[in-house]
Image (cartoon, rainbow, N blue to C red):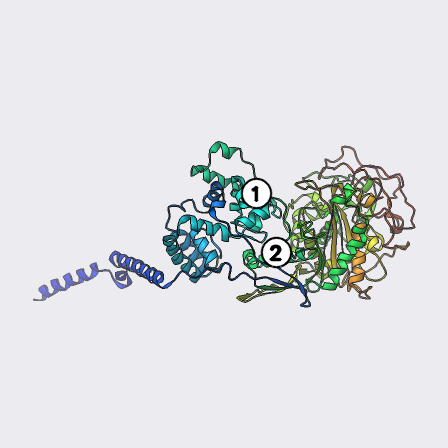
């Protein structure tokens, strides 16, 4: 019996050992399959219940359309937007091939599908739950439902409703009716809802007159209306929308809706320049667009803003805004003859003024008027800031503790070789920039080099610091990475920037190195939401000593350098002039302890398609350099904005706060000299170094001469690029027969 019991016990143990133990027995294949099918049935049941419970709501498209109210900082009304820009047109009025561009762009299976894209919707739900925001993949039916019946909220509830309603709409409505609804309710940018408004906004024609090429562009726009608007798009945006346009047309060929031979002959249909809507006259349109752009950067879709119902209060100070407009009119527009002078007709002025303590944009000048010139000259980024970038180079040198090639730490009094066309040392990229009038300065201090904007000095300084480090400092200060190569030529400001961008950079210097991001929106409220706005004052990006030292140097530019036209005894000021290659743009960026303002002039061709042209000959006064019209506009505005002046002085924390006092009094009201109107040839951005060694200037001793007797960057009558009139009023021109070789400042 004992052996029998043992055998039975052994068999029981063997059977027990053969069974899965612990948690493994809960994950058998049978159980997993049962769970999977159970969840599928549960999901299907849930969708069925949703299908029964969710009705097709009434259309919201017209009912929710309202005006927006834009206010000045003190609450007074700036403007109201008009009625929603939409005109419904029947599908029969839209050419068949234009209709098909939208199907080719968004949903090639539109005519065959059931109205929903399960994969795309599932992906959208997952990304919404994970916080990734907007996702594509919806069918035309789903997008129509979202536009016409629901809203743009990125929530799981809205996406589920969209799915169910789309199924119902697809069953009840004809495909052509759905397509017409989609085309007529979509937002195309420029405030245009629907294809009729879009055709007028982009091509100045009715939807019935659109061709397939234009239709493909409008269809491509729907993916990203703001980014793909050709008039305001960056180089990347233009590249992307061109690719999207090609994608649409290629899909049409694939679907046999377009002949391949016809397709190959189509050219990209560049749209017309945008025009302001009624009520957007004068500066109002520029202010509204700047506010809308800022809200878009904070995640508020422009389509939602265009629907209306918003109360948007700006930081704009009504008094200062008027002062800025009056200063441009007085110092520039009153002297231009736009009708009879071809050069004057090309001149565009822009400005941005910021409170350096709060980051608030208190005034902005976008141009002569939004209904005449829609592109804002305050925020456009297609021109180079030129020598207004040189203070960034100095800031980077100080912040990084950079040294010269022979091991000397760079500071305000460090001496450099100011010989024109001097090849830089220590760079793999050859660079030998020419100074204004090809003038040699010999050995000069960094302070004097800034006053006179000596190209050769700052070209070497960029190499000493390192172009990557200089670029990093620039981005930290608030510049954007737009055409920003890491080469020595960046010392001449060869990247693109706006007055808005540069106002942020200089306001950060003004604020002792704490980052200032210009902000025009004070608050934005809607009945359904209030926008959370970030603090315009950020973290410290450079040390206070670095920022204050740069300010100290820039005081000298205003006191006795190229920016003397901005100097008055009514306020303490610092600033820098800038004039780009061939005088295509002229800048003055300056600040007081209470106000930072950047003013610029741009030469813009009046021919179709635009393009940059020289400012030489503006108001029959030769070169419109940064030390001329921009500095005088800046001075006039600043005086008025500060109510006639201010006793506030810069509170600088620097090692040796010693100011140079000009021995010759200067006044910003002195008229410019009358230079030659011949434009200069355009030098290459990075010329090959001269084969011969540079010779010292016979007129310059090896020791730096008195700043009060040297010109502020070269004579205005030379055909090269300049920063200012050559010398302060009352001083003799030390080089009346300066050569005509081109220079860039």
**Could you tell me if residue 113 is visible in this image?**
yes
Tell me: 105 left or right of 230.
left
**Could you tell me if residue 413 is visible in this image?**
no
Numbered label attached to residue 293: 2
Q: Quadrant of the N terminus?
A: bottom left
Pick whichever, 481 or 606, lies toward us. 606
Residue at (49% x, 44% y) in the render: 94
Q: Earlier in the sequence, mark 2 or mark 1?
A: 1
**240 to 60, vertically: above or below:** above
Where is residue 321 drawn, in percent x and y? 73, 60
Tell me: 658 left or right of 498.
right
Q: How far separated are the C-alphas under marks 2 and 1?
A: 21 Å
Number of residues whose C-alpha sits closer than 10 Å to that of mark 1, classed few (under 14), some (14–19) or many (20 or more): some
Residue of label 1: 239
Q: Quadrant of residue 253?
A: top left
Where is residue 716 drawn, in percent x and y? 84, 44
Pick whichever, 233 or 708, lies toward us. 233
Which of the two discs, 2 and 1, sits closer to the camera? 2
Where is residue 220 drawn, in percent x and y? 52, 45
Residue at (80% x, 59% y) in the render: 573
Q: Quadrant of residue 163?
A: bottom left
Tell me: 624 left or right of 281.
right
Number of residues whose C-alpha sits closer than 10 Å to that of mark 2, classed few (under 14), some (14–19) or many (20 or more): some
User: Secondary structure under badge 2?
Assistant: helix
User: Secondary structure under badge 1?
Assistant: helix
Numbered label attached to residue 673: none
Q: Quadrant of the C terminus?
A: top right
Number of marks in picture: 2
Pick whichever, 58 or 713, lies toward us. 58
Residue at the left extreme of this rendering: 1
Where is residue 725 drawn, in percent x and y? 84, 47
Cβ atoms at labels 2 and 1 below 8 Å apart: no
């Amino acid at each position: 019996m004992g052996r029998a019991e043992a055998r039975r016990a052994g068999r029981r143990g063997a059977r027990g050992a053969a069974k899965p133990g612990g948690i493994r027995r809960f994950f058998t294949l049978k159980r997993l399959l049962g769970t999977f099918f159970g969840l599928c049935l549960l999901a299907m049941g849930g969708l069925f219940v949703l299908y029964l419970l969710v009705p097709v709501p009434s259309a919201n498209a017209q009912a929710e359309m309202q005006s927006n109210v834009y206010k000045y900082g003190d609450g007074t009304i700036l403007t109201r937007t008009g009625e929603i820009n939409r005109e419904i047109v029947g599908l029969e009025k839209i050419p068949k091939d234009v209709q098909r561009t939208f199907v080719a762009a968004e949903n090639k299976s539109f005519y065959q599908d059931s109205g929903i894209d399960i994969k795309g919707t599932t992906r959208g739900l997952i990304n919404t739950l994970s916080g990734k925001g907007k996702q594509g993949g919806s069918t035309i039916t789903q997008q129509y439902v979202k536009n016409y019946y629901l809203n743009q909220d990125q929530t799981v509830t809205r996406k589920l409703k969209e799915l169910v309603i789309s199924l119902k709409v697809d069953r009840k409505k004809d495909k052509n009716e759905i397509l017409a609804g989609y085309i007529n309710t979509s937002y195309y940018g420029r405030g245009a809802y629907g294809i009729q408004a879009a055709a007028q906004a982009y091509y100045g024609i009715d939807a019935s007159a659109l061709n397939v090429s234009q239709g493909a562009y409008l269809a491509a726009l729907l993916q990203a209306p703001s980014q793909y608007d050709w008039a305001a798009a960056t180089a990347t945006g233009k590249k992307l929308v061109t690719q999207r346009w090609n994608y649409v047309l290629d899909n049409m060929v694939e679907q046999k809706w377009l002949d391949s031979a016809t397709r190959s002959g189509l050219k990209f249909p560049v749209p017309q320049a945008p025009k302001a809507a009624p009520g957007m006259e004068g500066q109002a349109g520029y202010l509204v667009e700047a506010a809308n752009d800022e809200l878009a950067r904070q995640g508020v879709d422009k389509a939602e803003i265009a629907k209306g119902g918003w109360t948007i209060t700006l930081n704009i100070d009504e008094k200062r805004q008027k002062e800025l407009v009056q200063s441009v009119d007085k110092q520039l527009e009153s002297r231009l003859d736009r009708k009879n002078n071809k050069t004057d007709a090309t001149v565009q002025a822009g400005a941005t003024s910021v409170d350096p303590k709060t980051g608030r944009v208190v005034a902005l000048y976008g141009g002569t008027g939004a209904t005449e010139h829609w592109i804002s000259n305050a925020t456009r980024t297609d021109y180079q800031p030129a020598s207004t970038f040189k203070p960034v180079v100095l800031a980077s040198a100080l912040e990084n503790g950079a040294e010269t090639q022979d091991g000397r730490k760079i500071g305000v009094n460090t001496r450099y070789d100011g010989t024109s066309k001097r090849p830089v040392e220590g760079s793999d990229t050859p660079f030998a920039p020419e100074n204004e009038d090809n003038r040699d300065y010999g050995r000069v201090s960094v302070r004097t080099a800034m006053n006179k904007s000596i190209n050769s000095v700052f070209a070497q300084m960029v190499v000493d610091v390192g172009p990557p480090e200089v670029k990093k400092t620039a981005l930290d200060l608030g510049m954007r990475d737009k055409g920003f190569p890491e080469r020595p030529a960046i010392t001449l400001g060869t990247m693109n920037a706006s007055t808005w961008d540069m106002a942020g950079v200089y306001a950060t210097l003004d604020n002792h190195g704490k980052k200032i991001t210009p902000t025009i929106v004070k608050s934005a409220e809607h009945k359904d939401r209030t926008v959370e706005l970030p603090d315009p004052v950020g973290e410290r990006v450079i040390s206070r000593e670095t920022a204050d030292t740069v300010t100290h140097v820039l005081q000298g530019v205003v006191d006795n350098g190229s920016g003397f036209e901005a100097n008055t005894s009514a306020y303490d000021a610092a600033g820098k002039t800038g004039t780009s290659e061939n005088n295509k743009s002229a800048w003055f960026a300056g600040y007081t302890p209470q106000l930072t303002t950047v003013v610029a002039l741009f030469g813009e061709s009046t021919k179709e398609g635009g393009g940059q042209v020289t400012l030489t000959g503006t108001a029959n006064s030769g070169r419109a350099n940064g030390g001329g019209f921009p500095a005088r506009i800046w001075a006039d505005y600043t005086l008025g904005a500060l109510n006639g002046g201010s006793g506030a002085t810069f509170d600088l924390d620097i090692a040796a706060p010693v100011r140079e006092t000009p021995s010759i009094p200067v006044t910003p009201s002195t008229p410019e000299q009358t230079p030659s109107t011949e434009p200069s040839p355009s030098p290459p951005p990075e010329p090959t170094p001269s084969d011969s060694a540079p010779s010292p200037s016979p007129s310059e001793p090896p020791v730096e001469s008195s700043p009060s007797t040297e010109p502020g960057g070269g004579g205005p009558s030379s055909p090269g690029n300049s920063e200012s009139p050559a010398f302060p009023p009352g001083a003799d021109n030390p080089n009346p027969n300066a050569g005509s070789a081109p220079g860039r400042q």
